[in-house]
Image: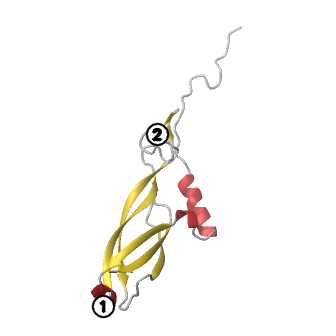
Amino acid sequence: MSEFPKPFADEIDIDFPSIALAVDRVRETFAAADESLAVVREVTLTSRQASSGAVIPIELGLQKLCACCGGRGETWAEPCGHCAGTGEREHPHHVHLAFPAGVADGSRFRFVVAPPAVRTTLVEVTISVA
């Protein structure tokens, strides 16, 4: 009697990417922005900029899925060295903020940033007039 090979003996492991990004996008659709994802920044304006208004460029460090491990935090059985096993890496994102004329010291502005392939992030900016 001949012996049949085991059904999956010749199979190999396949490293599928994480579906975390898709799950995050679905969660964001049904829930408000998560306060734990807030980026708090302070922007200093001169008194002239505060009285006449200004457009100020700022850089935000947003969380993005690690391209090396696809957001899994590991490659095969080893932790990903690029994201330290978290599945996310910091991604610089540049925005230009337009402040209205007459903005006061201590004013706060809140907005949401949602660039492609980056987790939606709540940003709070506090104005300091020097």
The answer to whether 125 appears left or right of 31 in the picture is left
Residue 4: percent from the left, percent from the top? Answer: 66, 16
Residue 110: percent from the left, percent from the top? Answer: 49, 77
Picture residue at 53% right of the left edge, 63% below the top: 37
Foreground tag (2 vs 1)? 1
In the rendered image, which residue does mark 1 sit on? Answer: 52
Q: Amino acid at mark 1?
A: Ser
For the N terminus, the quadrant is top right
Point out the tag, 2 or 1, that comes first from the N-terminus: 1
Along the line of sight, which residue is nearer the eye, 31 or 41? 41
In the rendered image, which residue does mark 2 sit on? Answer: 80
The answer to whether residue 110 is above or below residue 75 is below
Label ID, residue 114:
none
The answer to whether 90 appears left or right of 13 in the picture is left
Q: Residues within 10 Å of mark 1 (few under 14, many from 20)?
A: few
Picture residue at 34% right of the left edge, 76% below the top: 44
Along the line of sight, which residue is nearer the eye, 44 or 58? 44
Picture residue at 57% right of the left edge, 69% below the top: 33
Mark 1 and mark 2 in contact (Cβ < 8 Å)? no
For this orientation, the residue located farthest to the front is 130
For this orientation, the residue located farthest to the right is 1
Residue 92: percent from the left, percent from the top? Answer: 37, 60
- In three-dimensional space, the C-alpha distance between marks 2 and 1, rounded to whole angstroms, equals 49 Å
